[in-house]
Amino acid sequence: MTDTLRYLTSTLAVLAVSVAPMPANAQPTPSMDIKHVTHFEDIQTREPMLAELPDGALLVAGFPRYPHEPARAPSLWRSTDGGKAWQRVDVGTPADGAIGNSDVDLIVAPDGTVYFVTMGFNRTTREGTHIAIGVSRDGAKTWRWQQLAGNARVDRPWVVVASDGGVHVIWNDGAGVYHTRSKDRGASFGEAVRVSDKGGSSHFAAGPDGRLAIRVTPISASGNQLDKAYDFLMVSNDSGDSWRRRALPGEREWAELETANPPRWVEPVAWAGDGSLFYLWSEGRQLYLARSRDGGASWAQQPFASDEAMCFFPWLGTDGQGGLVASWFAFSDGMSVRAAHVQLRSGEPVITQSPPLQFESWMEREGKWMRDTAGEYVPVARLSDGDFAVVTPLQDPRDDRMGFSFWRLGAGQD
C-alpha cells in the first residue's frame, strides 16, 4: 500500500481486539542478540526492502511520501561495511524510465543480477499510475528500466526469481491480479496475464522446481476496493504457465482499511528448500504459521508468536539455507518489531526470536506522538556471514529526522 496506517491512528481502536487466550508455549524464547543498529538519515524511507549482493554489499530501497511530489527516481542505498555506513545509489533518471514514488521490491538473483521494481502513485487521486522495473547486471552500478504497466489504480508489485532463473512480477489494479515473466534475465517481459479477476497482490514467493505462490487478498487498488471473497492462494507448479486456486487455513476478518482490526495488508507466504509452502498470519494477539507439503492442498498449523495486545503486519521469507525468516509488529510496550528464524532441520519448525526492536518512527495524533509503522511489513534477511538483518523506517518530524534503521542480529542458538 502507499499512504499507510490510516487505520492505525487510533490507539483505542487498535487495542479493541478481543481474542481467546493463547497456549503458554506459543511465544518463542528470545535468543538473537542485537549486534549493532545504525540510524541512517537521508530522506523518508517507507516500506523498506533489503537485499545482499554476492560480494556482501547490502542494498536498501524504500519510498518517501510528500504531499505534491513530482516524478522522481526511486531511492536506493548501498553499504559495503556490513550496514554501518550507507551511500545513495544512482539508479538513473526519470528520462531513463527510473520513476517511482511508492511501493518497492528488491531481489538479487543467484547470478548477481539485481531486480528493483517500483510503482508510481498520484497522491491527489490516491491511485497508482504505473509499475516499472530496473535491472542491473553489474552490482547496482548501471541500470536498465522498463515499464510493465501504465493503467490507473495499479498497486503493490512484487518480484521473484524462480528456480529456473526466470524473473516473475505481479501487481493488481482492482480488476485483477496480474503476472508477467522474463526468460532473458529481465531484458524483456511477456504480456501480463490476469491470474485472478479481483483481489490484491498481497505477497509472492518462488520455490524449487518451478513452484510459485501468489497470496490474493480482498483489499486492492491501494485500499480503494474490497472484495471479501478473494482470500486465497494461487499456486503454480510450472513456472507460471498454469495456476490453481488453493484455500487457506485459519480465520481472518477483512474490512475497510479504517476499521480493520487487526490491520492487514501483506499476508506473507514462503517456500522452504524441501518444497514445503508456509503461510504466516495474525488472528489478533496470536500469529500462526501453517505448512503445506502438497502445494497448498492441505495445511498443518501451529502457534508462532503472541502478544498481550496485538501481533500484526507479519513478514516471511527464506533464509537461503532451507529455513525461514520472519518479522512482525507487536503492539504492547509501546509497539516494537520482532524478528525470528525458523529452522527446519528436524523436519518441524524450531523458532528463535529477537528481543523487541524499538524502532524510531513517529506520527502525531490529536496532539499526541505515537509510533507509526510507516508501512505494512519490515524486511528481514539472513546474511551470507550467518547474521540476520532487519530494516525499519526512521521518521521523526519533531527533529526532522528521516531515513531508516539497519539492525544486525546475532544468529542466536543455531
Image (cartoon, helix red, strand yellow):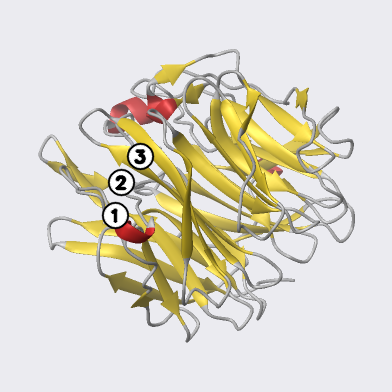
Q: Amino acid at mark 2?
A: Asp
Q: Amino acid at mark 1?
A: Ser
Instruction: Find the distance from the CA under tag 1 to the CA under tag 2.
Output: 5 Å
Q: Is residue 142 above or below residue 211?
A: below
Front position in the image: 119 or 213: 119
Q: Looking at the picture, how far across and down is residue 42, in whole percent? A: 25, 69
* Left or right relative to 26: residue 145: left
Q: Is residue 47 above or below residue 227?
A: below
Mark drawn on residue 53? none
**Which is nearer the N-term, disc 2 or disc 3?**
3
Q: Residue at x 39, y 67 (%)?
A: 91
Q: Nearer the viewer, mark 2 or mark 3?
A: 3
Say if residue 22 shows up in the picture: no
* Displayed quadrant of residue 217: top right
Q: Looking at the picture, how far across and down is residue 166, in whole percent? A: 73, 54
Number of marks in the rendered image:
3
Mark drawn on residue 2? 3
Residue bearing mark 1: 361
Say if residue 295 shows up in the picture: yes
* Crowd class of label 1 (few under 14; some 14 to 19; many from 20; radius 10 Å): many
Q: Residue at x 29, y 54 (%)?
A: 361
**Cβ–Cβ under 8 Å for marks 1 and 2:** yes
Badge 3 marks a residue whose secondary structure is loop
Front position in the image: 310 or 197: 197
Image quarter in which the N terminus is found? top left
Q: Amino acid at mark 3?
A: Thr
Residue bearing mark 2: 372
Badge 2 marks a residue whose secondary structure is loop
**Which is nearer the N-term, disc 1 or disc 2?**
1
